[in-house]
């Protein structure tokens, strides 16, 4: 992909942009040792999943072995019939456990720290046959063929795979600097052409308020690039 982009004239710079500012007719993007002046900006900074406390090497290995998963929409089918632990006992965790119930009837919701379940949440879980762990999570062990969760009350539970349902953090610092409209102060709001509330600024991928999927992000990028191209042509008087 890098070679193809460069073949058609793209310049790829490896650097971190820490600040962006809007001028009268363009934008300045700055980082350590780099300053870019540009007429348009496409923000594709994504989000970061919140993780349980897991060593980086063990985290990577667990992902590779299918013991740890983050997206039931992506791979819930692969966990069909398995014993699944969902980490995160709040409304978000309840929603994820209920979604996974489509694929398995062996699901347990485990609190990462505290239980935040109201009567409605517990009723929904009970109605779907989803168990709730007796206490909060203390340690995760991926050393065996299965995942072992040690709880605060010394209970040990084994699962075929676990899904952390702890939410995510949007990388929206640059969007906030520009004053782009955000949804719930998190993700960027765009129109049908991926334009943000600031003229000349576009957004694509998980940073946009939409389904966090690679296929969706690629669609966003195609729409944004086309709109950006045509908007610049219009500014330059190259459209009819």
Image: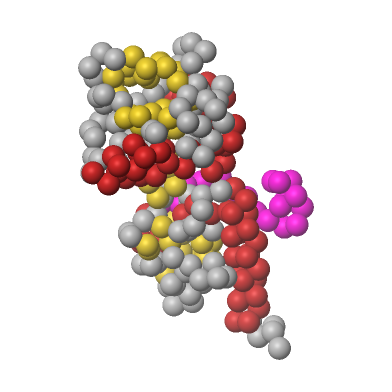
Q: Identify which residue, 161 or 119, lies in the foreground.
A: 119
In this picture the colour scheme is secondary structure
Give residue 53's position: percent from left, percent from top. 34, 26
72 sits to left or right of 185: right
Confirm whether the magenta stretch covers residue 6: yes
Which residue is at the far top?
A: 144
For the point 77% across and 52% down, which residue is it? Answer: 7
Figure check: 113 above or below 191: above
Q: Quadrant of residue 107?
A: top left
Above-or-below relation of 168 to 135 = below
> Is 103 left or right of 47, judged from the image as shown?
right
Q: Nearer the viewer, residue 163 or 79?
A: 79
Could one spot residue 21 in this view of the protein?
no
Is 171 covered by the magenta stretch? no
Question: Which percent across, then down, holds residue 114?
Answer: 23, 33
> Which residue is the extreme one toward the front?
127
Q: In the displayed structure, would residue 233 be above or below residue 147?
A: below
Q: In terms of depth relative to the viewer, which is nearer, 13 or 4?
A: 4
| Residue 161 in view (yes/no) | yes
Observer-nearest of 24 and 131 = 131
| Badge count | 0
Q: Is residue 227 left or right of residue 31?
A: right
Quadrant showing the C terminus? bottom right
| Residue at screen point 51% across, 46% down | 15
Task: Give x and y (percent) for residue 44.
Answer: 52, 54
Residue under the point 48% across and 16% down: 146
Across and down, in percent, residue 19 comes to: 40, 56
Query: Range of the magenta residues?
Result: 1-20
């Amino acid at each position: 992909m890098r070679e193809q982009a460069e073949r058609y004239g793209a310049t790829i710079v490896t650097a971190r942009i820490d600040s962006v500012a809007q001028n009268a007719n363009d934008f300045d993007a700055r980082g350590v040792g780099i300053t870019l002046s540009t007429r348009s900006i496409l923000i594709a900074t994504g989000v970061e999943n919140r993780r349980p406390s897991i060593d980086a090497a063990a985290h990577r290995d667990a992902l590779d072995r299918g013991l740890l998963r983050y997206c039931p929409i992506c791979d819930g089918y692969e966990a069909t019939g398995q014993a699944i632990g969902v980490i995160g006992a709040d409304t978000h965790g309840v929603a994820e456990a209920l979604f996974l119930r489509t694929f398995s009837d062996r699901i347990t919701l485990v609190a990462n720290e505290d239980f935040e379940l109201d009567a409605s949440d517990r009723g929904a879980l009970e109605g779907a046959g989803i168990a709730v762990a007796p206490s909060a999570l203390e340690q995760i062990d991926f050393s065996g063929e299965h995942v072992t969760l040690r709880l605060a009350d010394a209970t040990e539970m084994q699962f075929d795979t676990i899904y952390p349902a702890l939410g995510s953090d949007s990388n929206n610092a640059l969007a906030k600097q520009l004053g782009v409209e955000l949804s719930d102060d998190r993700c960027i709001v765009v129109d049908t052409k991926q334009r943000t509330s600031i003229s000349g600024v576009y957004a694509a991928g998980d940073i946009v308020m939409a389904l966090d999927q690679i296929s969706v992000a690629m669609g966003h990028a195609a729409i944004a690039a086309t709109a950006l191209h045509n908007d610049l042509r219009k500014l330059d008087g190259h459209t009819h």
